[in-house]
């Protein structure tokens, strides 16, 4: 709830800032747009392609993990069956080798999970990069001055025509009118 209020506050603050800069520059009819980045992203063909590829990789990985787990369970049962046959020292050595094999396989599984996550993140970054290019082009083509986000990232500025929104000159003129010199004298003679 606090995050939603914070995002609304940020969005309103950005709008007020934008509106005040528009007023200061005498800009008429500023063009503001809103975009739901998450919805656009997840509705895109690229997202569907990414999802399908990652799901296929995840299923193949899950089958591999299931196979490894079944193999480890068989080895554990086999080792347990040898407990009474083998001397305690030999059994301890085999048990230690089994545990080491299990730890190695768990590391490999975790590494594969990490690679799968990185693959998804790389695909998502490609989509975001393309989306940003499309958004900038659309904003320029449609002469938008400001594009704000709605949804989970509400209040985030995705595009701003900085040249048109830059209030530096207007503020400089007001500052110069307010104060043109400074007095550094300390009253000492």
Image (cartoon, helix red, strand yellow):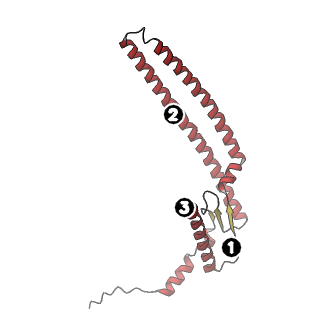
Identify the element where label 2 is drawn: helix
Above-or-below relation of 74 to 121: above
Task: Spot the residue most to the bottom.
Answer: 189
Q: What is the x, y in percent for residue 176?
A: 50, 84
Task: Return the disc, 2 or 3, that comes first in the chain's sequence.
Answer: 3
Above-or-below relation of 27 to 144: below
Identify the disc placed on residue 110.
Answer: 2
Residue at horizontal 64 percent and vertical 32 percent from the top: 59
Nearer to us in this view, 77 or 171: 77
Q: How far is disc 2 from disc 1 in space, using C-alphas?
A: 51 Å
Residue at horizontal 49 percent and vertical 29 percent from the top: 106
Picture quadrant of residue 122: top right
Above-or-below relation of 42 to 179: above
Identify the element where label 3 is drawn: helix
Crowd class of label 2 (few under 14; some 14 to 19; many from 20; radius 10 Å)? few
Crowd class of label 1 (few under 14; some 14 to 19; many from 20; radius 10 Å)? some
Task: Return the disc, 3 or 1, that comes first in the chain's sequence.
Answer: 3
Q: Would you name the residue on which mark 3 appears? A: 2
Q: What is the x, y in percent for residue 88?
A: 36, 13
Check the picture and name the quadrant holding the C terminus. Answer: bottom left
Identify the element where label 1 is drawn: loop
Which callout, 2 or 1, points to the residue nearer the camera? 2
Q: How far is disc 3 from disc 1 in space, using C-alphas?
A: 30 Å
């Amino acid at each position: 709830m606090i995050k939603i209020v914070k995002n609304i506050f940020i969005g309103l603050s950005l709008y007020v800032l934008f509106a005040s800069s528009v007023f200061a520059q005498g800009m008429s009819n500023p063009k503001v747009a809103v975009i739901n980045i998450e919805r656009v992203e997840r509705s895109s063909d690229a997202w569907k392609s990414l999802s399908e590829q990652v799901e296929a990789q995840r299923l193949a990985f899950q089958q591999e993990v299931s196979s490894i787990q079944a193999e480890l369970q068989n080895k554990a049962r086999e080792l347990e069956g040898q407990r009474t046959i083998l001397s305690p020292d030999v059994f301890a050595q085999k048990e230690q080798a089994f545990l080491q094999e299990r730890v190695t396989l768990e590391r490999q599984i975790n590494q594969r999970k990490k690679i799968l996550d990185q693959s998804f993140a790389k695909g998502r970054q490609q989509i975001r990069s393309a989306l940003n290019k499309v958004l900038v082009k659309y904003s320029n083509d449609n002469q938008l001055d400001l594009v704000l986000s709605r949804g989970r990232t509400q209040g985030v500025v995705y595009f701003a025509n900085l040249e048109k929104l830059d209030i530096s000159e207007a503020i400089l003129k007001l500052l110069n009118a307010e104060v043109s010199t400074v007095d550094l004298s300390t009253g000492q003679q």
